[in-house]
Image: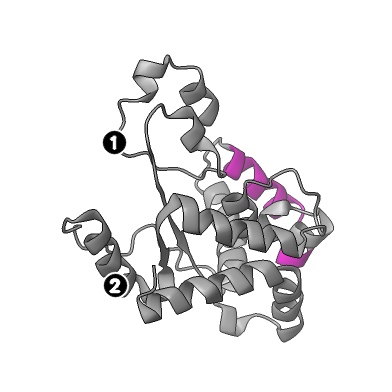
């Protein structure tokens, strides 16, 4: 994890050619050589719904992780997505992508500001090799191939939760509430989708 990596000696931190994880912006400062980020974004409502059902699924598998504990709380208390996300004010459902890209995990639930979106877009321009868009994944990967000068292997679908409720089956009021809270993520997702569609850097 981030703290374990931070504790390594500089020469050890310089060895990895690739690191994967759910990082907030800033991990590159621990690497004593130039580094670039790559991330994947998806429709914000779909992301929130997927996260909620992921926690539920992990709990049913009996995994003793933070996700498993979160899922057991959801199941034990019979929480809906609204009960869990809004009732408990989970920042994971509040513009989580902009939070991560801007490096702003410190902002309380419901207090994300427009300057965070501006900051996230600037960090993409300065520190990201590519932002992949789930709904345009093939095209995104082709552009990443050109940037890296290599041919990445095909990507398939893994860890698919067949039990989750699709967005189109969610109550319109819930969708609108999630969209309203995630207005920055929606704008960021659209900006990244436009870049992929036009081939802009």
Q: Dot 2 lies on which element?
A: helix
Give whichever of 43, 115 is nearer the camera: 115
Q: Residues within 10 Å of mark 1 (few under 14, many from 20)?
A: few
Please report the residue visible at 69 percent of the width from the left and 79 percent of the height from the top: 175
Please report the residue visible at 65 percent of the width from the left and 80 percent of the height from the top: 170
Vertical side of 172 occupied by 23: above or below: above
Vertical side of 128 occupied by 26: above or below: above
Residue behind mark 1:
17
Residue 79 visible to an observer of this rendering: no
Residue behind mark 2:
138
Give the farthest residue toward the left. 151
Residue 104 visible to an observer of this rendering: yes
Residue 58 point in image, percent of width and height: 53, 49
N-term mark: 1 or 2:
1
Please report the residue visible at 58 percent of the width from the left and 43 percent of the height from the top: 68
1 vs 138, left or right, is right
Closer to viewer: mark 1 or mark 2: 1
Measured in 3D between alpha carbons, the distance from the residue under mark 1 to the one under mark 2, in whole angstroms, is 23 Å
Q: Quadrant of residue 97?
A: bottom right
Q: Dot 1 lies on which element?
A: loop
Identify the mark at residue 26; answer none if there is no mark.
none
The quadrant of the image that shows the C terminus is: bottom left
Residue interval drawn in magenta: 66-82
Vertical side of 193 occupied by 159: above or below: above
Residue 72 point in image, percent of width and height: 66, 46
111 vs 123, left or right, is right
Q: Check residue 29 for magenta coloring.
A: no
């Amino acid at each position: 994890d981030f703290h374990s990596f931070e504790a390594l000696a500089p020469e050890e931190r310089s060895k990895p050619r690739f690191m994967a994880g759910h990082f907030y912006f800033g991990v590159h400062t621990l690497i004593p050589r130039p580094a670039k980020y790559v991330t994947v974004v998806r429709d914000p409502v779909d992301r929130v719904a997927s996260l909620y059902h992921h926690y539920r699924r992990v709990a049913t598998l009996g995994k003793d992780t933070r996700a498993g504990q979160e899922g057991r709380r959801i199941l034990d208390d019979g929480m809906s997505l609204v009960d869990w996300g809004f009732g408990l004010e989970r920042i994971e459902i509040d513009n989580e992508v902009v939070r991560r890209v801007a490096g702003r995990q410190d902002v309380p639930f419901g207090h994300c500001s427009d300057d965070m979106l501006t900051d996230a877009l600037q960090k993409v321009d300065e520190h990201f090799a590519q932002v992949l868009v789930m709904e345009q994944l093939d095209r995104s990967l082709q552009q990443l191939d050109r940037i890296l000068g290599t041919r990445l292997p095909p990507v398939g679908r893994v860890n698919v939760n067949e039990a989750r409720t699709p967005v189109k089956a969610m109550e319109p009021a819930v969708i609108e509430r999630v969209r309203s809270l995630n207005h920055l993520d929606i704008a960021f997702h659209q900006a990244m989708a436009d870049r992929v569609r036009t081939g802009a850097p």
